[in-house]
Amino acid sequence: MPTNPSPRNPYQPTPMRVLRAYYESTDRSLKTLELSFENHADSQAFFKKFNPGQFCQLSVFGKGESPLGVASAAWEGDFVRFTIQRMGSVTKALHDLKPGDPLGMRGPLGNGFPLADWKGKNLVIIGGGCAFSTLYALTKHVQHPQNRPDFGQLVVIYGARSSGLCMYKHDIQSWYQRDDMEVHQAIDVPEETWDHHVGYVPDVVKQIAPSPDNAVAIVCGPPIMTKFTLPALVSLGFPPETIFTSLEKRMKCGIGKCGRCNIGSKYICKDGPVFSLAELNALPADI
Amino acid sequence: MKYILPKHELNALLERWSAEYAVLAPQKAGAYSEFLPFTAPSELCLEEPHNTRYPPKALFFPQSEAILKYKQNLGQLESIEAVPQKRVIFGIRPCDAKAVTLLDTVFAEGDNQDPFWLARRAETLLIGLGCNEPGATCFCTSTESGPFHTDGLDALLTDLGGEYLIELLSERAVGLFGGLTPANPTQQESVQNLQQAAEQALPKAFELDGLKDKLDRVFDQDVWAQLSESCLGCGICTFLCPTCFCFDLVDEAQRDTRVRNWDTCMFRVYSLEASAHNPRPTRKERTRQRLMHKYSYWWEHAGKLGCTGCGRCVRYCPVGLDIRAMLRKASAYESEALHAN
């Protein structure tokens, strides 16, 4: 018989406000929102828990909630960044928000990347499409001078369908000047002004052939990319325990109650969204 | 300690409780019975050989419930407080009481406990009524429950014809009943015989031992297509199920309210993603999810079976799908097809 006195309502969002809003892609399908906290205490509580790879439920009141990966690192400032692909009514409403507009946020939710386990490892970060957003947060986290010594080599492979869909362009362009990391960008089909890789991410990964020695690989992308990238890494010699991916499913509560996002007995919202390939292999094929 | 309550004194007892508690009991509701605020003894449905159609989980986890108020344009939020209410739920069957304890593992344990569930649980007493003659759709003895099991109950009543024998199971129940005559040895013995007879009257619906492993092994097999062939996807098995807890969160824009509604894994849109990808595109995957959740996944996340054998999904399925037969078939498929070579 539970006797716990009334806990906080876990479905109650934190009040937030749009700080900055800008399109990320030339076709305007991707928009980045940077949100500030209305209350300082909420900000402190958020950053106490926050880890790259986690997500939040963003609320547009009257429309509903949508789960979105956090695209910023804690050191970047007192705000939380999301890059949102316009898909349905909530994401459309999020795209319509302007600086100063109020909205709600619940989170951070989920486990995030197991950074403590990755200490001293080389990181191979592989992203495709807008799923790169949480990997951007991870890369930003690792790049901070205080965090950088915790990790070995840093390789980022990021693919998009076209150059117009490439996110965080200016920042990623500046990564080529850094001597502490390697950047590879790819688009699916050739474009006149594109002087990076051309091809699908799994093929680019095979071509670059990152070393599995003392390394972990983190893969986030559309299901089709993930499906072919995971075996490519295995054939490069990455053991399943060193390959990580972040899963998505339709979600509502985000806290393991509403039952929606299960794969077998695991809930993506609560036990994930980050799983190793070894963990995924032990789960039923229900994704 | 066991006590005796003559049936003609029940009304006075329920009325006495009503002064302090909201008393809910199975009462007539159209063609069925449902847990409703106690009105009159003539409305009680305690003699039915089966449980209510509408599951009493709704008394703790309503079908539709406001969880947040907001002001759309201002972005202002107003939390909805969960207010505990002193209640007695009288006449709940052991399968349904056990189901409430199973739902505790979802809403009342671990991180992010649900305040709405907790508030309703905290000051509610569950007074059970055992099943002398379990119905044809009942299979509690196959699911680690039974017609006189006491999980989740504060007291259990056994119908002895002219009186009830009452087993008090919690301190709170002692205060609730108080001043009863102890049962004599003859009465105690007849209850024991009656309870045994009821247990034995229920045939074994399927072999629970090893069932989880068998289901896990047939996860990607065709048997699910066979089992779901006649399913209409109406979802009534899950809405009436006392352990199904899936819900949806929806903004009711005209009322500036965020609402939690029961949902069902038997619907296509339940798992449909924004990209149009659906991990459970047909009734085959959805039927598999319903059965595997109760008979496999629940073991893993709570160490318990997620079904209490109440039989509602069997009784009310519009095409007569029977979870007992489905489990037997899946089990037989595993034994025959997978071990054929």
Image: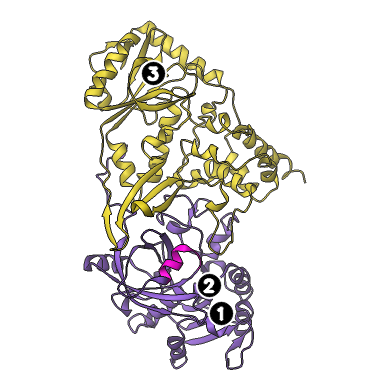
Chain colours: A purple, B yellow
User: Can residue A89 be found in the magenta stretch?
Assistant: yes
Residue A174 image offset from top left, x and y in percent: 43, 91
Q: Which residue is mark 3?
A: B43
Q: Amino acid under label 2?
A: Val
Horizontal arrangement in the rendering, residue B178 relative to residue A199 (left or right): left
Horizontal arrangement in the rendering, residue A263 relative to residue B17 (left or right): right
* Vertical side of A119 occupied by B306: above or below: above
* Vertical side of B339 occupied by B53: above or below: above
Residue B255 image offset from top left, x and y in percent: 34, 51
Residue A62 image offset from top left, x and y in percent: 38, 58
Q: Which residue ends up furthest to the front in the rendered image?
A: B254
**Mark 3 near mark 2, Cβ–Cβ under 8 Å?**
no
Is residue B111 in sight in this rendering?
Answer: no
Q: Amino acid under label 3?
A: Glu
Residue at the image point whose x is 46% and y is 43% from the top: B303
**Mark 1 near mark 3, Cβ–Cβ under 8 Å?**
no
Q: Which residue is mark 2?
A: A219
Whether discs 1 and 3 lie on one chain: the answer is no
Q: Quadrant of the N terminus of chain B?
A: top left
Q: Which residue ends up furthest to the right in the rendered image?
A: B341
Residue at the image point whose x is 59% and y is 54% from the top: A284
Majority SS type along the magenta span: helix
Q: Amino acid under label 1?
A: Ala
User: Can residue B74 be found in the magenta stretch?
Assistant: no
| CA–CA distance in space, label 2 to label 1 | 14 Å
Which of disc 1 and disc 2 is earlier in sequence?
A: 1
